[in-house]
Image (cartoon, rainbow, N blue to C red):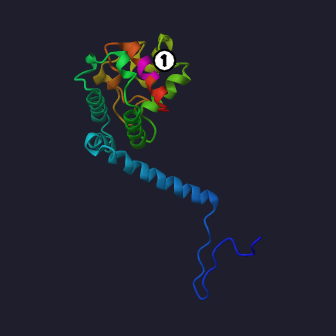
Amino acid sequence: MSNEPLLPQQPKGSKPQSQPLSLDALSERVERLEQKLDKALLLLTDIYRYQKLRDFLETENWKAADEETTRIMLEIMGKSSLENIIPDEVMNFPCSALSLLDQLWMSYSQGRFGFSVQQQIYTNLGGTDDISDIDMKVLQAMEAQFGWSVNNKLLDYEDLDFSSEAPVGCHPSGWWRSPYGAKMEVYFIARLISCGVD
Protein backbone atom coordinates (compact mmCIF):
# COMPACT_ATOMS: atom_id res chain seq x y z
CA MET A 1 0.00 0.00 0.00
CA SER A 2 1.38 3.42 -0.93
CA ASN A 3 2.25 5.97 1.76
CA GLU A 4 1.48 8.89 -0.60
CA PRO A 5 -1.03 11.41 0.76
CA LEU A 6 -4.57 11.18 -0.60
CA LEU A 7 -4.79 14.92 -1.26
CA PRO A 8 -2.19 16.93 -3.19
CA GLN A 9 0.23 18.81 -0.94
CA GLN A 10 0.52 22.60 -1.02
CA PRO A 11 3.70 23.88 -2.62
CA LYS A 12 6.06 25.29 -0.01
CA GLY A 13 5.70 29.02 0.45
CA SER A 14 2.17 29.18 -0.95
CA LYS A 15 -0.76 30.59 1.01
CA PRO A 16 -2.83 27.99 2.81
CA GLN A 17 -6.14 27.24 1.08
CA SER A 18 -9.40 27.92 2.83
CA GLN A 19 -10.97 25.03 4.69
CA PRO A 20 -12.60 22.48 2.40
CA LEU A 21 -16.38 22.71 2.11
CA SER A 22 -18.41 20.32 4.20
CA LEU A 23 -20.33 17.68 2.30
CA ASP A 24 -23.62 19.48 3.05
CA ALA A 25 -22.28 22.84 1.87
CA LEU A 26 -20.86 21.27 -1.27
CA SER A 27 -24.14 19.46 -1.99
CA GLU A 28 -26.04 22.72 -1.53
CA ARG A 29 -23.70 24.56 -3.88
CA VAL A 30 -23.99 21.82 -6.52
CA GLU A 31 -27.79 21.88 -6.20
CA ARG A 32 -27.87 25.68 -6.72
CA LEU A 33 -25.63 25.36 -9.79
CA GLU A 34 -27.80 22.55 -11.17
CA GLN A 35 -30.91 24.71 -10.73
CA LYS A 36 -29.25 27.57 -12.61
CA LEU A 37 -28.16 25.18 -15.34
CA ASP A 38 -31.65 23.68 -15.58
CA LYS A 39 -33.17 27.14 -16.03
CA ALA A 40 -30.66 27.98 -18.75
CA LEU A 41 -31.22 24.68 -20.55
CA LEU A 42 -34.99 25.11 -20.50
CA LEU A 43 -34.83 27.73 -23.20
CA LEU A 44 -31.92 26.35 -25.20
CA THR A 45 -34.00 23.43 -26.45
CA ASP A 46 -36.46 25.63 -28.32
CA ILE A 47 -35.97 29.29 -27.48
CA TYR A 48 -38.34 30.50 -30.17
CA ARG A 49 -41.28 28.38 -29.01
CA TYR A 50 -40.94 29.00 -25.24
CA GLN A 51 -39.47 32.50 -24.93
CA LYS A 52 -42.81 34.31 -24.84
CA LEU A 53 -44.14 31.91 -22.19
CA ARG A 54 -41.01 32.40 -20.10
CA ASP A 55 -41.42 36.17 -20.31
CA PHE A 56 -45.06 36.00 -19.14
CA LEU A 57 -44.16 33.66 -16.29
CA GLU A 58 -41.20 35.80 -15.24
CA THR A 59 -43.48 38.83 -14.86
CA GLU A 60 -46.17 36.70 -13.12
CA ASN A 61 -48.66 37.45 -15.87
CA TRP A 62 -50.38 34.13 -15.17
CA LYS A 63 -53.32 34.62 -17.51
CA ALA A 64 -51.15 35.45 -20.52
CA ALA A 65 -48.84 32.56 -19.57
CA ASP A 66 -51.83 30.23 -19.39
CA GLU A 67 -53.08 31.31 -22.80
CA GLU A 68 -49.58 30.96 -24.24
CA THR A 69 -49.27 27.46 -22.77
CA THR A 70 -52.48 26.40 -24.51
CA ARG A 71 -51.26 27.98 -27.76
CA ILE A 72 -47.94 26.09 -27.55
CA MET A 73 -49.68 22.80 -26.82
CA LEU A 74 -52.05 23.25 -29.75
CA GLU A 75 -49.11 24.13 -31.99
CA ILE A 76 -47.23 21.00 -30.91
CA MET A 77 -50.29 18.88 -31.69
CA GLY A 78 -50.89 20.63 -35.00
CA LYS A 79 -54.39 21.71 -33.96
CA SER A 80 -56.15 25.06 -34.22
CA SER A 81 -58.36 24.75 -31.12
CA LEU A 82 -59.16 22.55 -28.14
CA GLU A 83 -62.36 21.46 -29.89
CA ASN A 84 -60.21 19.70 -32.52
CA ILE A 85 -58.45 17.42 -30.01
CA ILE A 86 -59.96 14.10 -29.01
CA PRO A 87 -58.93 12.39 -25.75
CA ASP A 88 -56.99 9.59 -27.50
CA GLU A 89 -54.72 12.20 -29.10
CA VAL A 90 -53.45 13.56 -25.78
CA MET A 91 -52.12 10.09 -24.99
CA ASN A 92 -49.46 10.79 -27.64
CA PHE A 93 -48.49 14.29 -26.49
CA PRO A 94 -44.66 14.48 -26.38
CA CYS A 95 -43.37 13.85 -22.86
CA SER A 96 -40.40 16.19 -23.38
CA ALA A 97 -42.72 19.13 -24.12
CA LEU A 98 -44.93 18.34 -21.09
CA SER A 99 -41.87 18.20 -18.86
CA LEU A 100 -40.49 21.45 -20.20
CA LEU A 101 -43.81 23.30 -19.81
CA ASP A 102 -44.13 21.93 -16.29
CA GLN A 103 -40.58 22.96 -15.36
CA LEU A 104 -41.20 26.50 -16.57
CA TRP A 105 -44.43 26.84 -14.58
CA MET A 106 -42.91 25.22 -11.49
CA SER A 107 -39.78 27.34 -11.63
CA TYR A 108 -41.46 30.73 -12.00
CA SER A 109 -44.35 30.04 -9.59
CA GLN A 110 -42.05 28.65 -6.87
CA GLY A 111 -43.83 25.31 -7.14
CA ARG A 112 -47.42 26.61 -6.87
CA PHE A 113 -48.47 26.00 -10.47
CA GLY A 114 -47.70 23.34 -13.05
CA PHE A 115 -48.89 20.05 -14.46
CA SER A 116 -46.93 18.05 -11.89
CA VAL A 117 -48.65 19.89 -9.03
CA GLN A 118 -52.03 19.15 -10.63
CA GLN A 119 -51.19 15.49 -11.15
CA GLN A 120 -49.97 15.08 -7.56
CA ILE A 121 -53.12 16.67 -6.15
CA TYR A 122 -55.27 14.42 -8.36
CA THR A 123 -53.52 11.26 -7.18
CA ASN A 124 -53.58 12.44 -3.55
CA LEU A 125 -57.37 12.73 -3.90
CA GLY A 126 -57.48 9.09 -5.02
CA GLY A 127 -57.30 9.49 -8.78
CA THR A 128 -55.47 6.95 -10.92
CA ASP A 129 -54.18 6.64 -14.47
CA ASP A 130 -56.91 4.15 -15.37
CA ILE A 131 -58.61 5.83 -18.33
CA SER A 132 -61.49 3.35 -18.17
CA ASP A 133 -62.45 4.64 -14.69
CA ILE A 134 -63.69 8.22 -14.67
CA ASP A 135 -64.26 8.99 -11.00
CA MET A 136 -66.40 12.14 -11.01
CA LYS A 137 -66.03 12.61 -7.23
CA VAL A 138 -62.24 12.79 -7.56
CA LEU A 139 -62.45 15.13 -10.56
CA GLN A 140 -64.95 17.41 -8.82
CA ALA A 141 -62.77 17.52 -5.70
CA MET A 142 -59.74 18.37 -7.88
CA GLU A 143 -61.62 21.13 -9.73
CA ALA A 144 -62.82 22.61 -6.43
CA GLN A 145 -59.33 22.48 -4.92
CA PHE A 146 -57.87 24.24 -7.97
CA GLY A 147 -60.54 26.96 -7.76
CA TRP A 148 -62.02 25.92 -11.09
CA SER A 149 -65.48 25.22 -9.70
CA VAL A 150 -67.91 26.23 -6.98
CA ASN A 151 -70.59 23.77 -5.82
CA ASN A 152 -69.55 21.37 -8.63
CA LYS A 153 -70.24 24.05 -11.26
CA LEU A 154 -67.27 25.02 -13.42
CA LEU A 155 -66.48 28.72 -13.41
CA ASP A 156 -66.10 30.62 -16.66
CA TYR A 157 -62.46 30.96 -17.66
CA GLU A 158 -62.58 34.73 -17.14
CA ASP A 159 -63.72 34.19 -13.53
CA LEU A 160 -60.66 32.15 -12.50
CA ASP A 161 -58.11 33.64 -10.12
CA PHE A 162 -55.04 34.68 -12.11
CA SER A 163 -53.24 36.25 -9.16
CA SER A 164 -50.20 34.79 -7.41
CA GLU A 165 -52.56 33.87 -4.55
CA ALA A 166 -54.64 31.56 -6.75
CA PRO A 167 -55.08 28.08 -5.26
CA VAL A 168 -52.09 25.76 -5.56
CA GLY A 169 -52.45 23.84 -8.82
CA CYS A 170 -54.86 26.35 -10.36
CA HIS A 171 -52.73 26.88 -13.47
CA PRO A 172 -52.21 26.09 -16.26
CA SER A 173 -55.99 25.97 -16.53
CA GLY A 174 -57.04 26.87 -20.08
CA TRP A 175 -55.71 23.66 -21.58
CA TRP A 176 -58.09 21.64 -19.41
CA ARG A 177 -61.20 23.31 -20.89
CA SER A 178 -61.93 20.69 -23.51
CA PRO A 179 -65.45 19.97 -24.78
CA TYR A 180 -64.71 16.34 -23.81
CA GLY A 181 -64.72 17.41 -20.13
CA ALA A 182 -64.03 14.67 -17.58
CA LYS A 183 -62.84 12.17 -20.18
CA MET A 184 -60.17 14.57 -21.43
CA GLU A 185 -59.09 15.35 -17.86
CA VAL A 186 -58.56 11.67 -17.05
CA TYR A 187 -56.74 10.98 -20.34
CA PHE A 188 -54.47 13.99 -19.87
CA ILE A 189 -53.61 13.03 -16.29
CA ALA A 190 -52.89 9.48 -17.48
CA ARG A 191 -50.46 10.99 -19.99
CA LEU A 192 -48.78 13.08 -17.29
CA ILE A 193 -48.34 9.95 -15.18
CA SER A 194 -47.02 7.86 -18.07
CA CYS A 195 -44.54 10.64 -18.91
CA GLY A 196 -43.37 10.80 -15.30
CA VAL A 197 -44.38 14.45 -14.95
CA ASP A 198 -44.58 14.51 -11.18
- Would you identify the image quadrant in which residue 164 lies? top left
- Would you identify the image quadrant in which residue 100 lies? top left
Residue labelled with disc 1: 141
**Residue found at the very far front of the displayed protein:** 1
Depicted 55 relative to depicted 33: above or below: above
- The residue positioned 26% from the left and 30% from the top of the image is 75
Residue 89 point in image, percent of width and height:
35, 19
- Residue 150 drawn in magenta: no
Residue 103 point in image, percent of width and height:
41, 40
**143 relative to 59 in the view: left or right:** right
**35 relative to 40 in the view: left or right:** right
Q: Is residue 11 visible?
A: yes
Q: Which residue occupies the foreground of this view, 163 or 133?
A: 133
Local packing at callout 1 (Cα closer than 10 Å; few below 14, some 14-19, many 20+) is: some
Depicted 70 relative to depicted 40: above or below: above
Q: Is residue 168 visible?
A: no
Q: Amino acid at mark 1?
A: Ala
In this picture, which residue range is highlighted in magenta?
186-190
- The residue positioned 44% from the left and 24% from the top of the image is 191
**Residue found at the very far left of the displayed protein:** 80
- Would you identify the image quadrant in which residue 77 lies? top left
- The residue positioned 27% from the left and 27% from the top of the image is 74
